[in-house]
Amino acid sequence: MIFWVAVDVTTAPKIGGEEKDRASSDNVYEPAWVDLSSLRKINLMPPKFVSKIIAALK
């Protein structure tokens, strides 16, 4: 499980490595840039990390 924090990014996120090799119609990886204010509204897995990420970035 990897979470990235970035500022002023000009390229689209993409998967690679193990995630790219394991991706299938039943195992979907969807990298995306998400504003901190939207973090509680998305399906972030596992959910227990949402509060930890928000606390670490404030």
Image: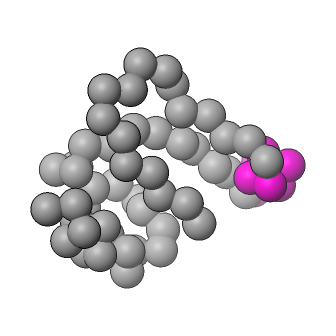
The residues colored magenta run: 18-26
Write the residue at 59% across / 66% down.
Answer: 1
Give the quarter of the image for residue 27.
bottom right
Is residue 50 found inside the magenta-colored segment of the image? no
Residue 8 pos. (x, y %): 31, 26
Is residue 9 found left or right of 56 in the rendered image? Answer: right
Q: Nearer the viewer, residue 45 or 14?
A: 14
Residue 14 pos. (x, y %): 62, 34
What colouring style does the render use? one colour
Write the residue at 41% across / 19% down.
Answer: 10
Residue situated furthest bottom in the rendering: 48
Q: Nearer the viewer, residue 33 or 47?
A: 33
Give the quarter of the image for residue 54.
bottom left
Can residue 16 be seen here? yes
Is residue 30 found left or right of 57 in the rendered image? Answer: right
Write the residue at 80% across / 55% down.
Answer: 18
Q: In the displayed structure, would residue 24 be above or below residue 12?
A: below
Is residue 15 found left or right of 26 in the rendered image? Answer: left
Write the residue at 22% across / 60% down.
Answer: 57
Q: Nearer the viewer, residue 47 or 5?
A: 5
Is residue 54 found left or right of 32 in the rendered image? Answer: left
Q: What number of labels is visible?
A: 0
Residue 3 pos. (x, y %): 47, 58
Residue 49 pos. (x, y %): 38, 74
